[in-house]
Image (cartoon, coloured by chain):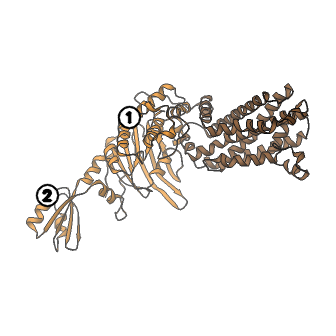
Chain colours: A brown, B orange
Amino acid sequence: MSMPVTRNLPRFGGFTFAMIGLELRRMVRNKRTVIFTVVLPAAFFLLFGTNAAARTERVGGGNVTGLILVSMAVYGAMLSTTSGGAMVSIERAAGWSRQLRLTPLRPAAYIAVKLVLAMVIGAVSVLVAFAVGAVSGAQLPASAWVACGLLAWVCALVFAAFGLFMGYLLPSENVMQILGPVLAVLAFAGGLFVPLDQMGHTFATIAQFTPVYGVGEIARYPLTRDGNLWVAALNVVVWTALFAAGAMWRFRRDTARV
Amino acid sequence: MTVTASPEAAVRGPGQLAVDLAGVVKRFGAVTAVDDISLRIRPGEVVALLGPNGAGKTSTIDMLLGLSAPTHGTVRVYGRPPQEAVALGLVSAVLQTGGLLKDYTVEETVRLTAVLFGRGRDDVGRALRRAGIADIGSRLVGKCSGGQQQRLRFAMALLPDPELLILDEPTTGMDVGGRHDFWSAIREDARGGRTVIFATHYLEEADAYADRVVFVRRGRVVADGTAAEVKALASGRTVRATLPGADEAALRGLPGVESVEVRGDSVYVHARDTDQVARYLLSETAARDLEITSRNLEQAFLALTGDETVVGSAR
């Protein structure tokens, strides 16, 4: 006060790793988030993927346990990235977004921080699921461990966009209580829990248009070398574009009050 | 009824205005929340924005902070558009409610603010100490009392070491002790020369802590003056007497009389020197049943903001 202070705007609109670090710490503190994103997918895998039949039946260069592991990793990644994106809902409800507007943080930098956070917890979720899988009888070729994991993680960006969209759309403080069941239904419809070829032709056709289908197909591809990659890629691109457009639309409305 | 400070006399040098609102209007659909407010605040002033709920205090503050834009008019904070002043840390605020995340600790919340403003750990410790919450740094925000949360907001507001600090009803929901502690901290801080604007509907707060009081009602500035002038406004007393056929003009002509009201056989004389009025009534008229009551700040406030008052803007 008494001394003149030099005042500068932060670089990158306020995007810093220090902020991401603090936000991660806060996220880990939330037990519900940890259970949803890390414990649940691994538990589902142990429950449904580790029976004797799955361990012995071969798929590609691995076993069915490995296949189910990849599906569960995708499920974990989508839960994580969705809840990462949906954090904005809680923060808006708490008036935190308004508080942040009293700082140099630019809205775009805020979104970038949320996306990075979503992807970080998505990566943790995939890694934990794979670690559990590795010691619980999942077999994948070495290249598939890496490729399936990376693809499950990268493609979960769709759901980071989905989470952001829902976070801006739903003003609820418990947005994941709504989105959790929605994601379970989508995962089922997209063939993550039950292979689509066991579901009948009509269902399998419809499934191709649901947002989880593409991610699952792509993530499993390094193991199965099966299915139409083009349809899956188109699915991922279209849904990402739709969710991102939705998030942008709501985001603009949210900041337009200025 | 109007109080006016002498604005030009107090201008210190050629310094820049801390706040310059010029013809500011804010409408929400058909509702006019702020109706042509012009207000200039100099650096170092401690100003109370006083008014009933819905007077337009919060709308005005939102515009000062760049949280909303005026429908008409201009807002400048230290010569800059509000959003720029906010981003540079020239102005910060303690808002009414919300604005905190329960899963952060007190220290983390302030540290995040420091990160955003590009400040270091030293600034975090200093803000915590100044707000008087250094001892509860590791407590989760969700476990803090309302008063502690308000001090946390204060610490966050102090972090960029702003030139202007804005407080929107900062002690709402606090008990008497908490209110006292909070104001002590603010007062201690303002001693360094910071400009402070606070909105309140507690008269005693405006009276005790502000150099200047701006009364707002229905989106307009009703009166604007020093705290001393507000006190003077409220310092008078009322003499009530039974006096059929009172000579209103004669009573009004007495020294120090501000208003005279006749209701039936009763006459109410409001004056600074009520002793003299009483002496006059008892010796020169047939008045009886005299009662003398003091008018408190609350009544002064009601007189200024009530619907029946004819309003004149001071500046």
Is label 2 in a helix, a strand or a loop? helix
Q: What's the CA distance linking mark 1 and mark 2?
A: 42 Å
* Residue B189: numbered disc: 1
Is label 1 in a helix, a strand or a loop? helix
Left or right relative to B237: residue A182: right
User: Residue at left 82%, top 40%?
Assistant: A216
Where is residue B51 shown, x and y percent of the image? 39, 54
Q: Which amino acid type is marked by label 2? A: Asp
Q: Residue B266, located in which quarter of the rendered image?
A: bottom left
User: Residue at left 59%, top 46%?
Assistant: A92
Q: Chain of mark 2?
A: B
How many labels sit on residues? Answer: 2
For residue A249, say whether it is visible: no
Q: Chain of mark 1?
A: B
For residue B28, say whether it is visible: yes
Q: Which amino acid type is marked by label 1? A: Asp
* Residue B165: numbered disc: none
Q: Which residue occupies the foreground of this view, A257 or A36?
A: A36
Crowding at dot 2, Cα within 10 Å, few <14 / some 14-19 / many 20+, comes out as few
Query: Please, is residue A117 above or below residue B172 in the view?
Result: above
Question: Disc 1 or 2, which lies upstream in sequence?
Answer: 1
Crowding at dot 1, Cα within 10 Å, few <14 / some 14-19 / many 20+, comes out as some
Where is residue B129 shown, x and y percent of the image? 42, 30
Q: Residue furthest left?
A: B283
Q: Which residue is mark 2?
A: B275
User: Residue at left 52%, top 51%?
Assistant: B70
